[in-house]
Image: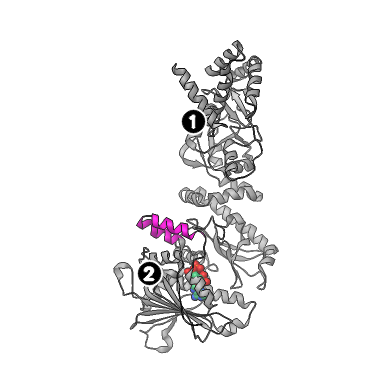
Amino acid sequence: MSSETFKFQAESRELLDLMVHSIYSNKEIFLRELISNASDALDKLRIEAIQFPDFLKESGEAEIVIETDKKVRTLTIRDNGIGMSREEVIENIGTIAKSGTKEFLQKIQDAKKGESADLIGQFGVGFYSVFMIANQVTILTRRAGQTTATKWVSDGKGEFTVSDAEKAAPGTEITLLLKPVDEENGLEDYTEFQTISSIVKRYSDFIGYPIVMTDENEKDKEKAKKTLNSMKPIWAKSETEVKPEEYNEFYKHISHDWNEPLKVIPFKAEGTIEYQSILFIPSRAPFDFYYQGYKSGLQLYVRRVMILEAFEDMLPHYLRFVKGVVESSDLPLNISREMLQHDRVTLQMKKRLGKKVLDTLQELLEKDRENYIKFWGEFGNAVKEGMTVDFENKDKLQELLLFYSTNDAEKQTTLKEYVGRMKPDQKDIYYFAGENRETMTNSPLIEIYKNKGYEVILLTEAVDEIVAGTIMEYSGKKMKSIEKGEADIEKTKDEKKADKELKNTEKEYDELIKYLETELGEYVKQVRLTTRLVSAPSCVVSDEAGMSPHLERFLKRTNMKVPENKRIMELNPAHNIVQKLKARFDADKSDPVISEYAELLLGYSYLGAGAEPPDVVRFNNLLVRVLDDTLK
Ligand code: ADP
């Protein structure tokens, strides 16, 4: 096929534009990205060679070769890895398949300059980073198992040209026509052996294949060809041998994230099953973390050979934000992904590694609260998801939860800290779910707890309520929603007396309550008196098994079928309005004001719980009428 010119996909064009005008100051990382791709290509060849052993014979010893030409100012990186077919080059280099890219680019454009460099780091631009340092890029590549090669050329300005070509062996060769040296703007002389050698050492020392370059300053031709990296697998080294920067660069290589990890977890298991691993907790959630197609999983090696690039079943699914590598000599080389999932050794490793992550998070929480809060902001939802699926680790997971509470408007609390602050007479752990913390803090439902000095956990995310439900009990204390069931709090003598009086009052209110139950029957299943309220005339609550208005609204919004969930309306007989209402009722049972007030009180009660009145239009009309009447 002859030469064809293509336009980059719109998203790619925008990214290239960002790269050409290089918002990223650390330009030398282009080399890390190219070496990382070359190393991936060599891994892929080895994975495919398990099925097609001829691939290895055809390619020879794995290596990554770097060559420069000072006169024409080119830098070439060559690998004898898997290579690409014509279609693959067009697809892989011309488009970005990650979902969410469009939204992400919009975010970069909206961000300020400094922030956008930070965001691009989170995206990890990969190959396109070459356009920070090169005016033109040529890729010559041949797919293993194919005979024809493909040449791809572009200046990164919107188009690329693809043509058929010749190449003696499979693999990829990338030639960069370098921009002029401009040290002020971070462009060094990338034709210099010393420059390249130190960049490779800094970012790519752990790469498992030799990165070879000829040192022109070396007169002895035999000695001039040098391997720049140590190649020692970083996970096999002892922790004291590895510098923090080395761990960080290794993280960037496997995660395609340009930011430093939040936490590095080197872990070696010894005993009946032996394996070595390094796990990483990212400092930011990948931009596509909440999209379908987010690639999770750990790299899996068996006896120095990578057998899977991303094995999801090495950790529980909810820990899918963890990146890393695991090497085991207890697994067979020729094992399929499906067989691995059910393999006894794998299952044990999965359990152990999952626990290791949870223990590390617990340690972070105890020793480095600031970073734990960062983690929680990025991945807290994953821990909450764990609460609903991983019952075996429930005890560990619930220690990791952070909640806002009435104790502090800014700082979140753990359950342990909450229990530590509980009043001596406090029986349960109280929580309240709603949309907005401010509304909740001022809700009539919370007043009695405030008066008693009891702390209430404030849940604002719909999933929180489900999580609270799965906790059930913590440290022997029940989790109790303040808007479900009767307010069951330790009573003082006076309060006990008030309760007794309430029994008598109930008799007096019997008729009014029956009347209100019929009037409001469409919305509530019961009307009753309460001592839970202080300055409010009424409130609505659910029964013990019911849903809070907040959760119900959330489920309705997500189009879920919500079972009919009528609430209980409670009246405060000590309140003026309630007493006056009763007097009016006793005087004239057909007084129309009674049913109007009943509806107004119901709407008011819903608002107090941070929810909308059941019939907003009617509530509004009634309110206006009452306002009008009072001015008469
Ligand atoms: P990423 O590596 O994050 O997927 P890149 O932009 O760096 O993104 O590369 C895009 C794709 O191009 C890679 O996923 C790979 O399929 C292909 N590719 C890049 N470099 C090489 C190479 N040296 N050999 C084979 N394929 C490559």
Q: What's the residue at 41%, 70% (across, down)? A: 158
Specify the segment rendered in magenta.
99-122
In the rendered structure, does residue 55 fall within the stretch colored magenta?
no
Give above or below for 7 relative to 109: below
Q: Position of residue 493 (x, y in %)?
A: 59, 19
Query: Extreme top residue here?
Result: 587
**For the residue labelled by badge 1, is the local secondary structure a helix, a strand or a loop?**
loop
First of labels 2, 1 by sequence position: 2
Which quarter shows the C terminus? top left
Q: What's the residue at 58%, 30% (across, down)? A: 426
Q: Amino acid at mark 1?
A: Asn
Q: Is 245 placed left or right of 533 in the picture?
A: left
Q: Is 506 placed left or right of 368 in the picture?
A: right
Q: Position of residue 222 (x, y in %)?
A: 43, 88
Q: Which residue is denoted by mark 2 in the rendering?
A: 132
Q: What's the residue at 67%, 61% (across, down)? A: 347
Q: Which residue is denoted by mark 1 in the rendering?
A: 442
**For the residue labelled by badge 2, is the local secondary structure a helix, a strand or a loop?**
helix
Q: Amino acid at mark 2?
A: Met
Q: Is residue 183 visible?
A: yes
Predominant secondary structure, magenta span: helix
Depth check, front residue: 157 or 285: 157
- Residue 250: assigned label: none
Q: Position of residue 523 (x, y in %)?
A: 62, 30
Give above or below for 589 relative to 430: above
